[in-house]
């Protein structure tokens, strides 16, 4: 998860929301991608 945050740090835009909301979005996308990979 930490690597995903570092890799996507350039996508954070303060005017679109809080840091916490952005972190939850990164976590959601990371978990979703992992579930897709393991279901194949």
Image (cartoon, rainbow, N blue to C red):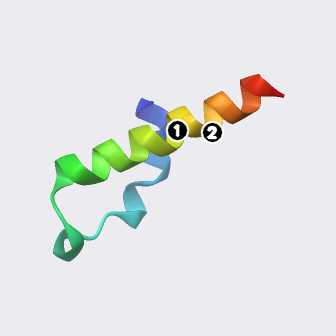
Q: Residue at x 62, y 39 (%)?
A: 33
Residue occupying image coordinates x 64% and y 29% = 35
Q: Are marks 2 and 1 in contact (CB under 8 Å)?
A: yes
Circle 2 packing at 10 Å, graded few (<14), some (14-19), many (20+), is few
Numbered label attached to residue 30: 1
Relative image position of residue 14 (x, y in whole percent): 19, 69
Given residues 39 and 20, the one toward you in this image is: 39
Q: Is residue 16 above or below residue 10?
A: below
Residue 3 in the figure: left or right of residue 34: left
Residue at left 40%, top 63%?
A: 10
Question: Residue 2, located in which quarter of the rendered image?
Answer: top left
Q: Picture coordinates of residue 6 (x, y %)?
A: 42, 45
The quadrant in which the C terminus is found is top right
Identity of the residue furthest to the right in this view: 40
31, 9: nearer the viewer: 31
Residue, x 70% and y 35% (percent of image)?
36
SS for tag 2?
helix
- Residue 24 drawn above or below residue 40: below
Seen as rendered, the residue at the extreme front is: 39
- Horizontal relation, residue 40 to residue 15: left or right: right
Residue that numbered label 2 is attached to? 33
Q: Position of residue 31 (x, y in %)?
A: 52, 32
For numbered disc 1, what is the local secondary structure?
A: helix
């Amino acid at each position: 998860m930490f690597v995903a945050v570092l890799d996507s740090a350039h996508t954070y835009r303060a005017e679109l929301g809080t840091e916490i909301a952005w972190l939850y979005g990164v976590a959601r996308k990371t978990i979703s991608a992992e579930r897709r990979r393991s279901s194949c």
